[in-house]
Image (cartoon, rainbow, N blue to C red):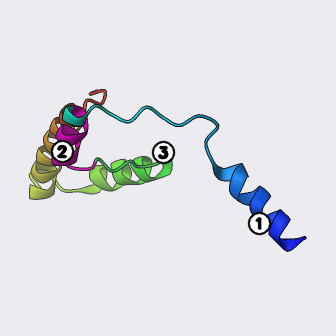
Amino acid sequence: MLIAALSLAACATAASAPERPPAPREAAAKARCPQVPTYGEAERLTAADHLDRLPAGSPVITMLGDYAIMMRAARRCRGEAVR
């Protein structure tokens, strides 16, 4: 009974149809691109609140602007949508 249950559980996590692997060139290009982290709505709102509390002229504001530019470049490199 245990073996049957484990076998069914393993089947439940498998994809119904395998995804088409990316073309070798496309896969190589993505491998060279940095990963892009994703943040939830709550994290973004908290970060915005913290950003609003920074004093004018804070170097953190400049650094976050640089980070935003790097994130857009990473998304473009990976072929993802850029906002």
Where is the N terminus found, in terms of image quarters? bottom right
Instruction: Quote the CA–CA distance across marks 2 and 1.
Output: 38 Å
- Could you say whether the residue bearing mark 1 is in a helix, strand or loop? helix
* Residue tagged 3: 41
What span is in magenta?
26-35
Name the quarter where the C terminus is drawn: top left
Residue 46, image x, y percentages: 42, 54
Mark 3 vs mark 1: in front: 1
Residue for point 35% across, 53% down: 47
| Tag nearer the camera, 2 or 1 | 1
Residue at the spot 29% in from the left edge and 47% down from the top edge: 36
Give the side of residue 53 with respect to residue 2, left or right: left
Tell me which label, 3 or 1, sits earlier in the chain: 1
Q: Write down the residue under mark 1.
A: 6
Q: Secondary structure at mark 3?
A: helix
Q: Residue at 26% across / 28% down in the picture?
A: 82
Which residue, given by chain and number where applicable, does mark 2 sit on?
A: 33
Q: Quadrant of residue 54?
A: bottom left
- Tell me the kind of residue under disc 1: Leu
